[in-house]
Amino acid sequence: MKGIASKIPKALPSGARLLCDDNSGAKIVQIIGMIGIKGRKGRYPFAGVSDRVAVSVKKGNPEMIGKVEHAIIIRQKRPIKRISGLRVMFEDNAVSLVDEQGLPKGTEIKGVIAREVAERYPKVSAIASAII
């Protein structure tokens, strides 16, 4: 996996509810676990932009509700500091559903995604409407 050239604060704990911004059928999802994030004993795990998480679908298509899926966080409200000194923040927290290999399940992402996601997951950036 490619490294990120930004300082990304981990702003989303497990239990956070997020908007699913693609057309895979899910509307609202809840983070239930982190994938590939190493933690410390006794410390509560958090995730940030371009991290993979395990989510449970809370609202959406009836056949998807309650299923556990993998997702990539594409936006977060907390500011991201880039190397150039620019700070970027979004209006909401959002994810896009992916499979185990990191390929998107939907065919388009309605909103914008962070540039850090586009660098790490080029297939997700290919279906995005805009990259900031």
Image (tube, rainbow, N blue to C red):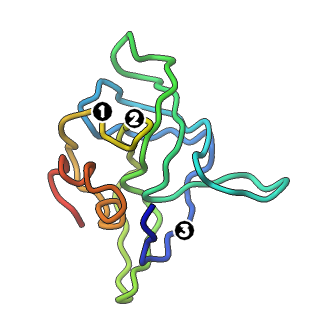
Find the distance from the CA under tag 1 to the CA under tag 2.
Answer: 7 Å
Find the distance from the CA under tag 3 to the CA under tag 1.
Answer: 26 Å
Pointer 3 and pointer 1: residues touching (CB < 8 Å)?
no
Q: Residue at x 43, y 71 (%)?
A: 4
Residues 107 and 61: in front is 107
- Relative side of 44 to 18, left or right: right
Could you tell me which secondary element the residue under label 2 belongs to? loop
Check disc 2: other Cα within 10 Å, few if <14, some if 14-19, many if 20+: few
Q: Quadrant of the N terminus?
A: bottom left
The amino acid marked with disc number 2 is Asp
Which label number is shown at residue 2? none
Q: Quadrant of the C terminus?
A: bottom left
Residue of label 2? 99
Residue of label 3? 9
74 w.r.t. 28: above or below: below
Residue 37 position within the rendered picture, expressed as x and y whole percent measured from the top left = 62, 54
The amino acid marked with disc number 1 is Lys
Residue 93 position within the rendered picture, expressed as x and y whole percent measured from the top left = 41, 50
Q: Return the residue found at the far right.
A: 42
Pointer 1 and pointer 2: residues touching (CB < 8 Å)?
yes
Find the distance from the CA under tag 2 to the CA under tag 3.
Answer: 25 Å
Q: Residue at x 33, y 55 (%)?
A: 121
87 w.r.t. 44: above or below: below
Residues 100 and 28: in front is 100
The amino acid marked with disc number 3 is Pro
Q: Residue at x 62, y 40 (%)?
A: 33
Residue of label 1? 105
Q: Residue at x 35, y 26 (%)?
A: 26
Check disc 3: other Cα within 10 Å, few if <14, some if 14-19, many if 20+: some
